[in-house]
Image: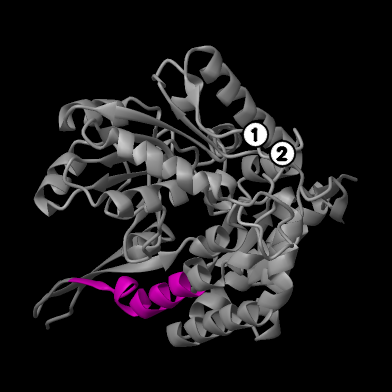
């Protein structure tokens, strides 16, 4: 039997461990949820909504325990108070639009025919959630899947081993049945075997490109629907008419918050040449003011990365870039231990030949390049294997829309960054993945259309 261990980035100790289910035990657990799904879907929509919202409130009631637990598991400083604000915002929106999003689509009715399309839940939805924003990324699918009438199996990343357990505990405490929403502990081999067995009716995975490829390989030939949010290398573009102070503050926060471990974090910035020097000067001043340290301490603004191996990859990208001519603007912080505690870094004189501007970093480093016009910026933004979000900074809405139309990305931001609006579809292109969550489209992806063509007896 496999033991799953969460190694705390604070001190390298084992913070939590759980036994993974055997394949037979996992199959039995999923069978329970398959059996329960039709009865759950038959409950009134408002009843499902009310139970999900009560589960959300129960998670909120745990926040004082959750915040330090997250610091221990993945290093986010306690001063930021966890994820409950976004967690609640997303579910509240999905609850508010559920009736309209799941309503029958009327095609036409006359004396002879009645025609309409229903939205039917898939059945058992498998949610594989990541460690970087473990509550918000999980709830993106868990809540609308349950509201739509699916049962849900949640498997969380080992780095945030206790998150799924807490979510299930909260939801069960308010009356969501245990055979409707289940948290499971699985190793990779068992997960792949279950997917290959066609155990699930729909799968949503957030994680690495390699993880997504493993999911696709396991699902080959099963025709199971896959929603994948994978890697990112999100750009920011500061045009010559931008509000410079706002652009610097937001883009650098987007690059460094959560130690750079954000799905839609800013990993490369392109600044019009007329603003470039001023932008870099302001950015360096901000980053030099960060306090790297123990995330349990109130004055810490930058915690350790979730695991030392993640920090090693960022250090390697920085070292390679500097060796190839990049300029590093931030001296090593005294708290940098060569392990999970990693100094933030701003790089200039970078090129797209460097991995730091090409590969996903997922850490507190950003490269900044000057550009002469929109065409150059667009070409550089599109010179990436990924496409999740892009952040444009200008006072001209029409210009932002025109530039946005030419960028290969899932979301276009203007004068903001690193935010998930639940009213919009959260989606990506290229190696960032396929599918879409939240918004009305999120409900469509968690259900299937079923058409009714009913001929009336007229004699």
- Dividing the picture into quadrants, the one containing residue 168 is bottom right
Q: Is residue 199 left or right of 116 when viewed as pictured?
A: right
Q: How many numbered marks are there?
A: 2
User: Magenta region, mostly helix, strand or loop?
Assistant: helix
In the image, the segment drawn in magenta is 88-106
Residue nearest the observer in this picture, 16 or 212: 16
- Secondary structure of residue under mark 1: loop
Residue nearest the observer in this picture, 456 or 331: 331
* Residue 122 vertical placement versus 112 (above, below): above
- Residue 151 image point, x, y percent: 58, 67
- Residue 191 image point, x, y percent: 70, 44
The residue depicted at 73 percent of the width and 66 percent of the height is: 68
- Residue 388 image point, x, y percent: 38, 43
* Residue 3 vertical placement versus 34 (above, below): above
Q: Is residue 2 left or right of 291 when viewed as pictured?
A: right
- Residue 278 image point, x, y percent: 31, 39
- Dividing the picture into quadrants, the one containing residue 415 is bottom left
- Secondary structure of residue under mark 2: loop
Look at mark 2 in the image and give the residue it sits on. Answer: 336
Rounded to the nearest angstrom, the CA distance separating label 2 from label 1 is 7 Å
Q: Are marks 2 and 1 in contact (CB under 8 Å)?
A: yes
């Amino acid at each position: 039997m496999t033991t799953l261990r969460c190694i705390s980035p604070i001190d390298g100790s084992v913070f939590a461990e759980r036994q993974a289910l055997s394949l037979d035990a996992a199959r039995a657990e999923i069978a329970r949820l398959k059996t329960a799904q039709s009865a759950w879907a038959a409950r009134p929509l408002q009843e499902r909504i009310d139970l999900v919202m009560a589960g959300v409130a129960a998670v909120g009631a745990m926040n004082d325990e959750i915040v330090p637990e997250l610091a221990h598991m993945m290093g986010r400083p306690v001063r930021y108070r966890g994820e409950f604000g976004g967690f609640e915002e997303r579910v509240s929106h999905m609850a508010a639009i559920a009736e309209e999003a799941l309503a029958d689509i009327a095609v036409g009715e006359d004396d002879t025919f009645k025609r309409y399309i229903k939205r039917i839940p898939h059945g058992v939805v498998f949610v594989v959630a990541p460690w970087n924003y473990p509550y918000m990324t999980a709830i993106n699918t868990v809540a609308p899947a349950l509201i739509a009438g699916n049962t849900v199996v949640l498997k969380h990343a080992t780095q945030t081993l206790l998150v799924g357990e807490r979510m299930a505990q909260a939801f069960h405490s308010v009356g969501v049945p245990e055979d409707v929403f289940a948290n499971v502990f699985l190793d990779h081999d068992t997960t792949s075997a279950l997917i290959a067995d066609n155990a699930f009716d729909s799968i949503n995975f957030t994680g690495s490109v390699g993880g997504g490829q493993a999911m696709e390989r396991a699902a080959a030939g099963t025709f199971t629907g896959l929603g994948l949010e994978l890697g990112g290398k999100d750009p920011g573009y500061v045009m010559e008419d931008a509000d410079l102070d706002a652009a610097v503050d937001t883009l650098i926060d987007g690059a460094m918050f959560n130690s750079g471990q954000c799905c839609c974090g800013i990993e490369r910035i392109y600044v019009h040449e007329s603003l470039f020097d001023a932008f870099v000067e302001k950015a360096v001043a901000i980053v030099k003011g960060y306090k790297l340290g123990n995330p349990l301490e109130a004055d810490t603004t930058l915690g350790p990365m979730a695991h030392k191996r993640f920090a090693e990859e960022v250090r390697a990208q920085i070292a390679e870039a500097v060796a190839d001519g990049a300029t590093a603007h931030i001296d090593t912080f005294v708290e940098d231990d060569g392990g999970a505690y990693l100094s933030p870094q701003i790089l200039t004189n970078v090129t797209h030949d460097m991995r730091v501007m090409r590969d996903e970093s997922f850490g507190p480093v950003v490269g900044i390049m000057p550009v002469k016009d929109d065409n150059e910026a667009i070409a550089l933004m599109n010179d990436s294997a990924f496409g999740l979000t892009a952040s444009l900074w200008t006072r001209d809405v029409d210009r932002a829309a025109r530039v946005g139309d030419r960028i290969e990305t899932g979301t276009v931001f203007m004068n903001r960054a690193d935010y998930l609006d639940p009213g919009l579809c959260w989606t990506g292109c290229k190696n960032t993945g396929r599918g879409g969550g939240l918004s009305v489209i999120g409900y469509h992806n968690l259900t299937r259309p079923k058409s009714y063509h009913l001929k009336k007896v007229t004699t």
